[in-house]
């Protein structure tokens, strides 16, 4: 029975990672006031006829204390995709996304699991974003379904909900700060997530990255996560506060992001009502999403 419990915990961990890994973004309801003098206006504008390859690489460490025994799970998630312009719809951008590769690996006391998800290679869908990066239409990603070992069926929507960091709608200049409050809610057949997030942003100025003048935006993140997941017939509740930091480099003249990195830590509790189990969990995530040549 103990092995069954642990298998459920590992499966839950992967569901938690995949549902929340991309959920922290530059989602914004308030922007800095317009400051024309010495300011820059940041907007997406992927040039036609050119393809951009991005690689998302995430390392997750999940430490669970089960009856005084530490159970450590290491999860690695990798995705490569190509982005290119498919024209405009009014002021919005229509982007074609092609998956190059995707892999997920789990290391736990029970061994290793996962690997490359070969069914996703060369899958293509279109998504529409506003000039500031907000999603207008992501229905194409929802239609691409795949199976993750240990957590069942999923689709590409979760991976692209905040793939494109949302930019401030108003011009910003070096030193500008602003605060936004947002609540991320999502629900699938096997999982529901509710996550209020507060983001304290700062425009650090212009820095060169890969020889390109980039706007550097940093953020201090805080909030809480409440999730219910179904794994192997068991209902699992996970909740707790998290903190983190985020850094974005956006090519000002070119109109696309070069690199985004997130470091976050959640200290919370896992509850399995059917087994009358309740124990602490600490999860740390280090992830990056950047252009590669």
Image (cartoon, rainbow, N blue to C red):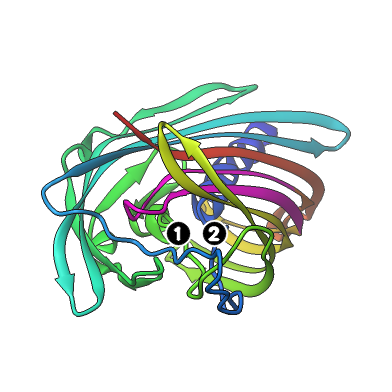
User: Foreground residue, 186 or 108?
Assistant: 186
Camera-nearest residue between 251 and 190: 251
| Residue 126 on the magenta segment | no
The foreground one among 115 and 197 is 197
Kindly identify the residue that appears in the image at 81 percent across and 37 percent down: 65
SS category of the residue bearing label 1: loop
Q: Residue at x 11, y 48 (%)?
A: 49
Q: Badges 2 and 1: C-beta atoms under 8 Å apart?
A: yes
At x 65% / y 36%, what residue is drawn? Answer: 6
Residue 113: horizontal and vertical position, in percent? 46, 26
Reading the image, the residue beneath label 1 is: 162
Distance, label 2 to label 1, CA atoms, is 6 Å
Question: Left of 291 or right of it: where is 191?
Answer: right
Image quarter where the N terminus lies is top right
Expressed as whole percent of the image width and height from the top left, the position of residue 156 reads: 33, 54
Q: In the drawing, what numbered circle is on residue 131?
A: none
Instruction: Answer with mark 2 or mark 1, whichever residue precedes in sequence.
Output: 2
Q: Determine the secondary structure under disc 2.
A: loop
Crowding near pointer 1: few (<14 within 10 Å), some, many (20+)? some
Quadrant housing the C terminus:
top left
What's the mark number on residue 25?
A: 2
Residue reaching furthest to the front: 37
Query: What's drawn in magenta, residue-wise?
Result: 241-265
Res 114 → quadrant: top left
Foreground of the two, 196 or 64: 196
In the rendered image, residue 262 lying in the magenta stretch gets the answer yes
Q: Residues within 10 Å of mark 2 (few under 14, many from 20)?
A: many
Q: How many numbered marks appear?
A: 2
Residue 179 locus on image (x, y percent) = 69, 71
């Amino acid at each position: 029975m103990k092995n069954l419990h642990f298998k459920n915990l590992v499966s839950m961990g992967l569901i938690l990672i995949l549902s929340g890994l991309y959920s922290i973004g530059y989602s914004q309801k308030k922007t800095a006031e317009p400051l024309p003098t010495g300011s820059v206006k940041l907007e997406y504008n992927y040039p036609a006829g050119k393809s951009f390859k991005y690689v998302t690489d995430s390392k997750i460490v999940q430490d669970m204390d089960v009856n005084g025994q530490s159970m450590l799970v290491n999860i690695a998630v990798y995705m490569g995709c190509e982005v290119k312009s498919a024209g405009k719809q009014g002021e919005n951008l229509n982007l074609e996304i092609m998956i190059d590769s995707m892999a997920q690996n789990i290391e736990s006391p029970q061994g290793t699991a996962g690997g490359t998800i070969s069914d996703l290679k060369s899958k293509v869908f279109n998504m529409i974003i506003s000039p500031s990066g907000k999603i207008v239409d992501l229905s194409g990603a929802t239609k691409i379904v795949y199976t993750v070992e240990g957590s069942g069926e999923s689709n590409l929507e979760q991976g692209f909900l905040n793939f494109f960091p949302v930019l401030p709608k108003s011009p910003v200049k070096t030193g500008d700060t602003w605060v936004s409050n947002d609540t991320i809610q999502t629900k699938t057949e096997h999982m529901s997530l509710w996550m209020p997030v507060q983001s304290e942003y700062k425009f650090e100025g212009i820095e060169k990255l890969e020889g390109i003048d980039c706007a550097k935006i940093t953020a201090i993140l805080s909030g809480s996560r409440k999730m219910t997941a179904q794994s192997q017939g068991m209902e699992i509740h996970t909740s707790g506060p998290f903190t983190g930091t985020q850094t974005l480099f956006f090519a000002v003249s070119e109109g696309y992001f070069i690199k985004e990195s997130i470091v976050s830590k959640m200290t919370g509790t896992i509850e399995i009502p059917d087994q009358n189990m309740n124990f602490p969990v600490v999860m740390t995530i280090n992830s990056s999403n950047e252009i590669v040549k």
